[in-house]
Amino acid sequence: MRRQAVFFLVLALLLGGLAALLALQVLRAPTGAPDAAREIATEQVVVATRDVSAGALLDMEDVRTVPWPAEALPAGYSRSVSDVVGRGVLLPIRMNEPILSSKLALPEAGAGLSINIPEGMRALTFPVNEIVGVAGFVRPGHKVDVFVTAGPEAAGGQTTTKLVLQNIEVAATGRTIQPNPQGEPETVQNVTFYMLPDEGERLIMASQQATIQLALRNPLDGDTVETQGVRLNQLIAGAPAPRPAPVVRAPAPAPAPAAPPPPSRVQLEVYRGNQRGTQTVDTTVGGGGGGGGGGGR
């Protein structure tokens, strides 16, 4: 009995030691997460330290490098800050966004508005007031239409409003200090547009000889429309749309007159030898005949 108790005691000690050894091995085993993290290859990528607007010139305070997964490197990324410092920004860049070559001007291009002008277009600036500028809602990147109102001397004797330019991109907005007619300084809002040269000619003429009004467009609406414009007399009188010209129809030809009915009685001249006479025949009766008389010669 005593030997049996010792046997079970020794067996319990062995099993306990084995369990403790297994537990120690489990606790010492490294977790899978650090191994997975160490297995991911990374590259240094230049990102922005703050928001950078279009036209700005990048400096050392605007950029930094961060590790980036090598399997998900963005196209056109930069590895060194020296590759991007001193280059102009073509499109706005957000904080912590990778600095891509597609958003930067060439190293020799510099900075400013000129690097953003699309090829074949021009940047023109015009002063506007709060009403013309759609109460300040016009911002860079927006698209607008331009309405022009010309006085009687420039519009054939009638004040006229017409839509002259459509889907024009706003390049920049800002304010400047200019003297008013009394010589006092006042704040003037300016809007700069990207436009083709012929569009610039039309807008310059309109700004000099008429008044302009901007109309903000939906960014998804790129359609153009055709308008006839409106004159002041049409607006005041509420003139309706022109009516179609009346259709003039040629008179129908008069029916031909009916042929007169044949005479019902016909008088015939009859000769008997050297005697001449007359005889009346009734044509309404198939075998009709009549009397007659004659005279000789």
Image (cartoon, helix red, strand yellow):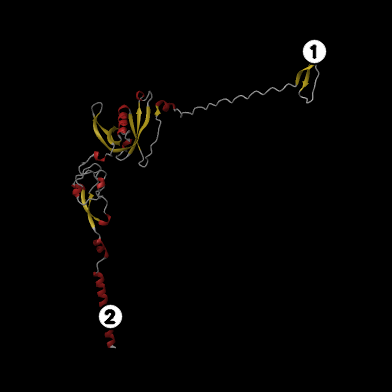
x and y percent of residue 274 in the render? 79, 14
x and y percent of residue 35 in the render? 25, 64
User: Depth check: 289 or 45 in front?
Assistant: 289
Q: Which residue is mark 2?
A: 12
Amino acid carrying mark 2 in the image: Ala
Q: Which residue is mark 1?
A: 295
| Residue 8, placed above or below residue 121 | below
x and y percent of residue 245 in the render? 49, 27
Do labels 1 and 2 touch, CB within 8 Å? no
| Residue 31, placed above or below residue 277 | below
Q: Residue at x 40, y 26 (%)?
A: 232
Nearer the camera: disc 1 or disc 2 = 1
Amino acid carrying mark 1 in the image: Gly
Left or right of 24, for residue 264: right
Q: Using the rendered view, name the quadrant where residue 218 is placed.
A: top left
For the N terminus, the image quarter is: bottom left
Left or right of 283, for residue 36: left
